[in-house]
Amino acid sequence: MEALFAMAIGVLAAAGVWLLLRPRTFQVIVGLALCSYAVNLFIFGMGRLVVGRPPIVTAGRLAEPVAVVDPVPQALVLTAIVIGFATTALLLVVLLAARGLTGTDHVDGREAG
Amino acid sequence: MSAWFTHLPVVPIIVPLVAAAAILFLTERARVLRVAVAAVSIIVQLVAAIVLLALTTEAFPDIWSRGVGAYAIGGWPAPFAIVLVIDRLTGLMLVLNAVVVLAAFINSLAFWDRAGPHFHALLQLLSMGVNGAFLTGDLFNLFVFLEILLAASYGLLLHGSNSQRVRFGLHYIVVNLTGSLLLLIGISLVYGVTGTLNMADLPARAAALSAADRTLFDVAAAFIGIAFLTKAGCWPLNFWLPGTYAAASAPVAAVFAILTKVGIYALLRLGSLIASADVLLHHEGSALLRPDLFHGGLYYLGFATIGFGIVGTLAAQQLSRLVGYSVIVSSGLLLMVMGLDHPPLLAPALFYLVGSVLATGAFFMLTGMTERAWRAPSRPSSTVAEPALLSTGGYVPFGVRRGPPVPEPDAEVGVAIPAAMAFMGLMFAFCVLLVTGSPPLSGFIAKFAIISAAIHAAKGATWEPAAWILVFVTLAAGLASLIALTRIGMRLFWSVIGRNTPRLRVLEAGPVAVLVLLCIGLTIAAGEVMRFFDSTAASLRSPQIYIETVLATGGGR
């Protein structure tokens, strides 16, 4: 499972970085989205990959450390998703404004060459 | 225990948050009310910051006797819950932020706050993010506050949008989002390895790591370092900076002057804390913060940053770009000083940081005024809905309908100050003296103190040339910006052709004068101020007090 997980992160990050370096604004925004998926999965993985261990403690019973998974990375990833979503939405609006103002979807606002 | 100061550390975060929300509820028409809410909020922040700073000094020995106060949010014990920490450096940065935000706020009232919607709300959120980043004692919270200040800064940069702003705004947003992703990787890696996000808890945990985990920790530190160096405008991560700062409107660029220093602050704070783990590791003969990598890296990156800044300064044709490059030079100088890792250099560096933020803030606002003097004279009907400065060629960005007509900057409204050109020339001269570090103002004192400490360092250093190079580079940076600014100043103030004297209102000219006067105040009280910076630097060098105070907070309430 670890290898598959790591490969998924690697593929997402590689595709994201490649798109991030492209000259079209839409490619850049998709690249950023892919990179942020990769980072979110990475944060999730930092809580160790386990199956069948919910991050929930039953009320009134003392939690056994082996029966629960660390809830902090899950809280972190939730925050990161929300922030990433909001900033991507903002970037999308700026992208549209840039398209409207400059008449091109090149990141520099003018065609190269 | 519920003394009056117990909840004071949270005030600089709560007040702007509430004010921003309140401003959003008021309509654009209720401008007076909006401005009043914003003004009250900023003044409360300034007062709170000054009180917090005073409480950390020796003047109030019975409150935070060791100069560090910690506030446990929700009353949970410290290593598990989020804490806010206030020490001298934090207090100093809070005061600096409140002063710059207040100046930019007053400056914006003359014209810019009406150039688009929600200026005041965004400014409040920016202030909240900066305050939070300075106050927080938790790594992930640092990320969250950085995102808040960046999100607000995106909005402010695009404020009064024209194609220039949107173009550079796009670059700025993409660069910062990528930087944030790197920061996230670093922070989650730190958590995965050490199991803590509390900055005070980190050194002890990191010192106890096994060799394999130490490698991972080093990688995490590298990611975090790259993210903060991007924010600090370090070469080669700073190509976005000059264009962005030049494209922003004058009051916005003035507040941006402090944003690069948030990155510097984070590096100072984390560097100081992690270096303290070396004390724990001492018996093994290994150091957690590898001096060759961390300090050497900062030193050379700072050197390259100054080099880039000098070349840019000499090449810049536009005053606003030139000031942007001087922000880069000041970041580079601070990085170099941090990289030299010579304790007596720290206090002058802090002095330089404060002086350069005030000076560049004033300079950006002055730039906004000078740009108006060399535009074509405005049409006689001065209340047009789409002033020339905001022209977007018919396209309405963001679907924003303009509110009430915006008066032209030179419109015959408000109280104008007499002898506008003379005032601008005088302020320009002061700003040049401050930015280049020429005598007799505070820039000179800061650079003189840095050079003097560097020469002392050269005597006992392991690699002597490093300190001499710092001396040389400090002087060269001053000379380069003096040449460039003199050239632009001559063109701006001595050529009469094509110039029209702008009407400067007290609201926009006042903040520039106040910031310059503050710098003059720093010069006159240099002895007192330097003593304070010495004690601040001393507290940074002994983070044990910080760590112990934080870990003892919370619980038992």
Image (tube, coloured by chain):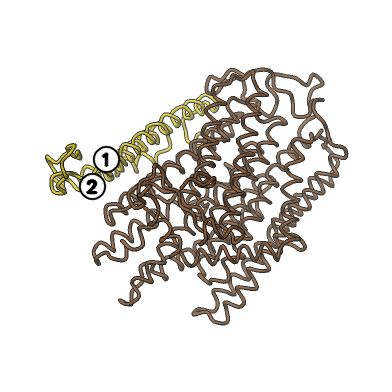
Chain colours: A yellow, B brown
In the figure, residue B283 lies in which quadrant? Answer: bottom left
- In the image, residue B556 sits, relative to residue A89, either above or below, namely below
Three-letter code, disc 1: Gln
Q: Mark 1: few, some, or many residues within 10 Å (few <14, many ≥20)?
A: some
Task: Report the residue at 45% width, 60% height from top.
Answer: B546
Residue B323 x/y as whole percent? 66, 49
Residue B84 x/y as whole percent? 45, 48
Residue under pointer 1: A74
User: Is there a contact, CB below 8 Å, between mark 1 and mark 2?
Assistant: yes
- Which one is nearer the viewer's eye here, B141 or B358? B141
SS category of the residue bearing label 1: helix
- The reply, left or right, for residue B532 in relation to residue B289 is right
Residue B393 x/y as whole percent? 62, 22
Residue B412 x/y as whole percent? 82, 25
Q: Chain of mark 1?
A: A
Q: Is residue B170 visible?
A: yes
Residue under pointer 2: A47
- The reply, left or right, for residue B179 in relation to residue B88 is left
